[in-house]
Amino acid sequence: MSALLLDGKALSLKMEAELAERVAHIKAKSGRTPILATILVGDDPASATYVTMKGKACQRVGMDSIRLELPSVTTTEQLLAEIHTLNANPDVHGILLQHPVPHQIDERACFDAIALEKDVDGVTCLGFGRMAMGERAYGSATPAGIMTLLKHYQVPLAGQHAVVVGRSAILGKPMAMMLLSADCTVTICHSKTQNLAALIAQADIVVGAVGRPEFIKAAWIKDGAVVVDAGYHPGGVGDIELKPLVDRVAAWTPVPGGVGPMTIATLIEQSVQAAERQLVS
Ligand code: NAP
């Protein structure tokens, strides 16, 4: 069987080309440039790299970004104050707080302080709830990017059994709700799940969002399944053992070049949408 490559890199480039046109239109109509504010707290090198990649993506589509860097000793109150300032700044159209923040900070409180109309990374409880209820909201960027990828490649979703491994607030949980909204039958697995391999064996669609290199074994996945790997680890492997699968699944996301670029493209798309709503509608 020749498996369909769900090429997130190629789709993200196509999205960026379209977003550059939308940004040019916003600038022409409003005389202003869309701005994404990014907040990086602490000195985690991976987080710094992600924030840099997001800033560069803004540049590629003609947006500006403001990069706020706060020390690792930042308190919840200090971070909340910065978020409130950005909320009140009419020149800032979207806010990204890079996850994770240092342990002494109440990350949930800080995410929830982001104004709904600027929550372009889809991290607030209010945004999650609205998304889950089918109301207008920016989706959490990684799962929303995965949905865009699946829809672009016309992967059948209705009635399919999707097994999501992982239930984090930014990935597993919103992923499950988005697949449910697309009429999948959804099973959510986590660290206390029993018989994980047997559940995955039933999946028409498997989403790996575990955070452990090649934790999900190829042998657990049935022939003809759709395999989505959100993980990325040193050595260029994801959360799923992908290599043995590429000849016997229906479709799969490469690592790198699958989910990662879609996350950034989705963040930028939602930032452009936020700027359109704030500046030209
Ligand atoms: P996370 O917050 O650490 O969550 C991991 C989830 O996996 C938890 O829900 C945990 O269950 C579950 N889990 C851990 N051990 C398990 C086990 N033995 N069996 C079943 N489930 C288990 O991670 P995350 O932020 O969601 O990220 C998940 C992966 O996606 C990581 O590889 C990360 O690098 C990647 N990621 C990629 C992007 C991107 O842009 N490509 C963005 C975000 C994350 P419990 O809830 O029970 O602890």
Image (spheres, grey):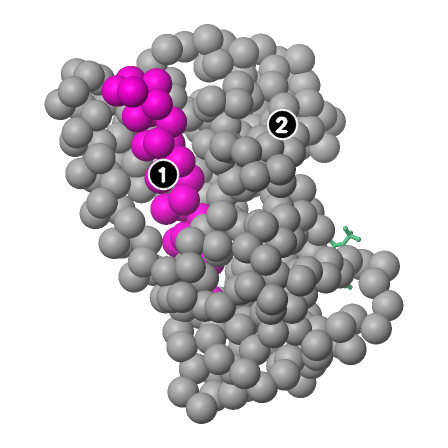
For the record, the magenta segment spans 255-281
Asked if residue 270 lies in the magenta stretch, the reply is: yes
Q: Residue furthest left?
A: 28
Which of the two marks, 1 or 2, is nearer to us in this view?
2
In the picture, residue 66 is in which quadrant?
A: top left
The answer for how far apart the CA atoms under marks 1 and 2 are is: 20 Å
x, y percent for residue 228: 53, 66
Q: Is residue 281 above or below residue 151?
A: above
Mark 1 or 2, nearer chain start:
2
Q: Residue furthest bottom?
A: 1
Residue 181 horizontal side relative to residue 107, left or right: left
Q: Which mark is residue 126?
A: 2
Q: Is residue 24 left or right of residue 277?
A: left
Q: Secondary structure at mark 2?
A: helix
Q: Is residue 73 left or right of residue 280?
A: right
Circle 1 residue = 268
